[in-house]
Image (tube, helix red, strand yellow):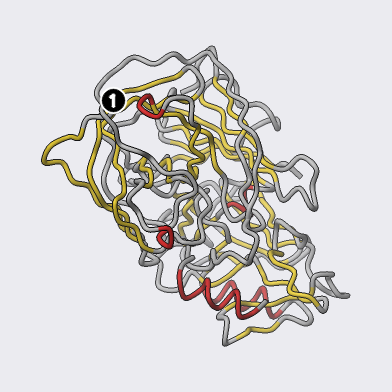
Amino acid sequence: MWSQLLTLVESTVIVSRDVGLEIPITAPKLDNVVDAYRAAHRRRNTLPFTGEHPVRDTVLAAPLSSFGNDYGYTVSVKFGSQGTQSFPLLIDTGSSTVWVFDAAVRSDQGGKLRYHANSAAKLVSGMKWESGYSDGGLAKGNKHEDTMRIGNYQVKLNLPVAQHATGFAAMSCSGIIGLGLDNRNWVLPSTAFAIDLKPDPKAHPDAGGSIQFGGSFAKYGALTWVPLDKQSRAWFVPILAYRIGVSGQIKYHQRSAEATGSGQAMPNQRQHCALLDSGTTFTMLDDATLTALMSSIPGSSFDKAAGLWVVPCVPRAGAPDALWFLIGGTWFSLPYRPGGLLWWDLGNGKCSAAVQSRGTNECDILGAFFMHSTYAVFDEGNKRIGLAKKI
């Protein structure tokens, strides 16, 4: 098992509308262990939008498929030049580009289904693109005029098609649909969307989840709204404090001790920031918080060879129920269970932790495993993020 993990570590890693569009999405999982350890994404390049008016009132039900213990989540997308073929694209709030793998990409560079350029998808002369990733991943190539369809919503665009890609070998998808805030050429059905992720079907029968564009976002009751920093170009939220266990001592982050009782004010909201990133699997923390958490879990250890924390799959006496985050005056949890603090069962009662170090990144990352227990609304129109507890 560790040899598989090491190989992968070396090779890798949403304004309300009256009528909404809700799309069930898939929870992909790999046959082997997937490296999501360094999946902290920072994208560049925006998606050119040619201005076609969309249709917003159709519901799309996408079939569920799985790989890699909730490594990532995909939504089915169609392209006009490709006929009836559906392409599973990774939903990624940490990036801003929609792109697909070209048929010419080598099989070892990734891609589940490939995009075959034809006469219906005109090559845009002189237009190149490139998207870089902080984990070393890179995709680049040409652009083709095409139509992207999600349900009955469609938009014409100059679609980036990757002729070269590195760092995506473990991804069982056909590309990425970037939902990042810094996408200035917004092509989605609404300026607000919600993501509801469900964990692995082996542990939970309702795996997969949904992404909803527009409409009402009251699925889990009242939302805690957190305003975005005016200068922010990504879906950042300030974490005011954390606590280990429901009755644990509250630890305020640096310069946040002056926060009001509701936790809604802070001298510098970027002092301890977190990127809400559906394209990252794990929760990535600063080393001080991570060390405190692991020190509170009896039987935890750090595997130097794999570069990952390992914890008991069944919590021992004295272990915390969850890691709690204070965001916008509300406590949100990452529970000690599969799909929360636990990721891959390594055997002998040991599991790899779904919480790891953020390394040199400036901000924490609240990834897919955090969203298993937290419903997230991304409201670009009102410059805010809404969160609701699911458990």
Which of these two is toward me, 286 or 147? 147
In the rendering, at what x and y percent does residue 391 appear? Answer: 76, 45
In the rendering, at what x and y percent does residue 187 appear? Answer: 35, 28
Inspect the image, locate mark 1, and give the three-letter code of the amino acid beneath it: Ala
The answer to whether residue 184 shows anywhere in this view is no
Check disc 1: other Cα within 10 Å, few if <14, some if 14-19, many if 20+. Answer: some
Q: Is residue 150 above or below residue 267?
A: above
The part of the image, by quadrant, that contains residue 24 is top right
Q: On the picture, is 56 further left or further right than 391? A: left
Which of these two is toward me, 144 or 230? 144
Q: Is residue 244 above or below residue 306?
A: above
The answer to whether residue 57 shows anywhere in this view is yes
In the rendering, at what x and y percent does residue 213 appear? Answer: 51, 26
Which of these two is toward me, 239 or 90? 90
Give the residue displayed 72% in from the left and 51% down from the top: 200
In the rendering, at what x and y percent does residue 125 appear? Answer: 12, 37
Q: On the picture, is 351 further left or further right than 369? A: right
**Residue farthest toward the right in the current orientation of the protein:** 317
Residue at the spot of label 1: 120
Give the residue displayed 52% in from the left and 71% down from the top: 8
Give the residue displayed 40% in from the left and 66% down from the top: 135
